[in-house]
Amino acid sequence: MSSDTSEEVTETVELSVEGIGGGSSLSKADTSTQLPSRRVRSLNVGVKTPYNPHRLAAFLERNETHATAVRKKSRWEVGFGFDIVPAQGLDVDEADDQERTVVEEFWRGRDSKWLTGPNQSAEPTTPEEVKELARQDFHGEGWLALEVLTDNEGRPVGLAHVPAPTVRVRRPQSRYDQPRHPETGAFVGGDDARLASRGYVQKRDGKRRYFGEFGDRYRGVDVDIVDGDGDDPPKVRYTMPAEGADEQPIFVDRETGDVATGSATELDNEPANEIIFVRNPFPTEQDYGIPDWVSAMRTMAADEAAKDYNRDFFQNDTIPRMVIKVTGGELSEESRRDLRQMLDGVREESHRAVILETEKFTQQLDEDVEIEIEPIGQGISEEMDFRLFREKNEHEIAKVHEVPPILIGVTSTSNRSNSQEQVRDFARNVVEPEQHKFAERLYQTIHQVALGVEDWTIEYELRGADAPKEDADIARRKISAVRGAIPVDRALEMIGEEPLPEDHPVDGQTLVANVGTDPAGGFGAGAGDGVEQSRPDYLPPEDNKIDEREWADVEADLATKDPIEQTQFNSSNLDEGLYDFGTQELYLSFLREDGEAQSSLYAYVDVPPSEWAGLVAASSHGSYHHDSIRLEYPYIEVTNFHDRLPEGPEPDPEDVPDDIPDV
């Protein structure tokens, strides 16, 4: 305020909120401005694929390792079922119950339809079968296509698998940046250029069938969920946009590929169903996906050539194994005929003994006749080279698929010690990300767009990812973070224990903090005030048990182990311990409460040597076992144990890691 005025001046400043650059520039930010690919496109058959998909699919018939890996990945991703769960950030109590009912009706309703191919409506099929076939396409050819089946009002009622090799993406022809119709090749200008190329085309047995892009028929449509009549479940209701609205539904003619907006009545034929198209992204590919295994195509071709060579060799025996030299005479005609018959492929006689007779030359009666048989093939050496070559190929094919050897039937490089960790890594780092991406795609398309469901998604069952140590640590941190403000039964479930029985003196709904358990140590570290398990708390939980073995079998097996270490414990519950360095198995026997030997034995698997050294060196062996081993590793229960563990060398007291906890 200036010094020469006595009145307060108020200024109003208007801010421009048009956006950077003004006008409607911000409204264009959600559309990519990249230049499209100029790949040559063929009339009537859509965009040309980067690889011939039928040839890619043929590799499944030619290579057993590749086929097994593709089938295994697909089954692990979607074949074990799924649950309907709240969307991310929502609790069960917050999610809308009507929306859940709508989703349940789609996936598991009485009128749901699931087809693995055309004209199979009478054949019972499950969602898992349909999606497993689609995932095989995804891994085999690089993309998948699911046809969305609808009722007369456009509500989704199921999915059908469309073989990926038969599907092509439709795009306008590109001739010097002048878009042309994908079927006729005629020039198309304005907005019609975009509409003329919507959707996909399937070519099969010389015929074509067109499909729309999923979501086109719901453009501008309001989707609501309304209560059903009487006992009927709630249903989805669609309200079409007003005439002249910016967004209008798009429909594709299933026979001609022509496109209409606003209403399907403008089409000459029935409107096409829509396809959910999922591609395996690749940096150099825009329209389709590329499978992860393409880098191993030459390896598969070499493996097929090796199998052909091996088959021809055994069928025809075309490589001579020996040469017969006759000196000082000649073979008789009968011997020639007999030898020729054996070598010309009479395989049932190829290994019989052959008697060769000779005739002396008349002009060399004073010379002896000699017959020499000399090998010229390597035989066993060739067979060994062939087997090693195929094993190398098998390893490389499994490597590009990221499938552990044990899951494709290769056991020569696997044992109990490493196979479980390989399977766990496969589940966590290969299968789980694909499950999440696929479930998210179905949630964003079917649930959100077509059903109007925001609160519920799907979650596929993940097999082989059991990690007791990781899960127990996470559970302890969660319980500690809320300072024990969690019901006892819920805490027991989190750490892998059974809930309290109904006749237990402590109510399972009592908070952990109120029963005297120290949350910082994690519920389950001690019995707490009155909270006891159905089995002694120093024993591993039942949920971590993976197998049972008889002591007689284990005793015979341990007698051959080397190297091992064995020790006696000075503990109130631990009696003996034995560690097998070869398989990384830790055998622990326990004492009864009265100090007598326990009649059973537990073998923890995948235990690193550092844990064994830490257990032996700990000031309290029982506490170390309880805090660092009991919940961390799966175990095998050895039944009928009534003996002592085999004797072995004592652990070296100097061989102790620096990071052993002080317990």
Image (cartoon, helix red, strand yellow):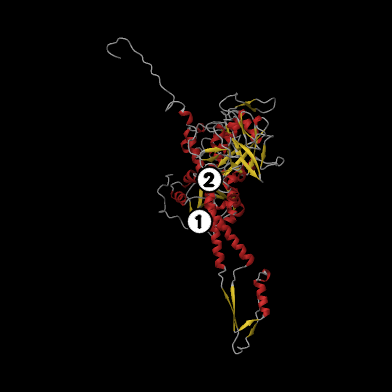
* Residue type at tag 2: Val
Q: To which residue does mark 2 refer?
A: 430
Q: Name the one closer to the observer, 539 or 357.
A: 357
Q: Which mark is residue 191?
A: none
Residue 11 image-quadrant placement: top left
- Expressed as whole percent of the image width and height from the top left, the position of residue 330 reads 63, 82
Q: Residue furthest left?
A: 3
Q: To which residue does mark 1 refer?
A: 582
367 lies above or below 627: below
The residue sitting at 34% across, 13% down in the picture is 9
The residue sitting at 41% across, 53% down in the picture is 655
Q: Residue furthest top?
A: 6
Quarter of the figure that contains the N terminus: top left
- Expressed as whole percent of the image width and height from the top left, the position of residue 42 reads 58, 44
* Residue type at tag 1: Gly
Q: Name the one closer to the observer, 380 or 506.
A: 380
Residue 663 image-quadrant placement: top left
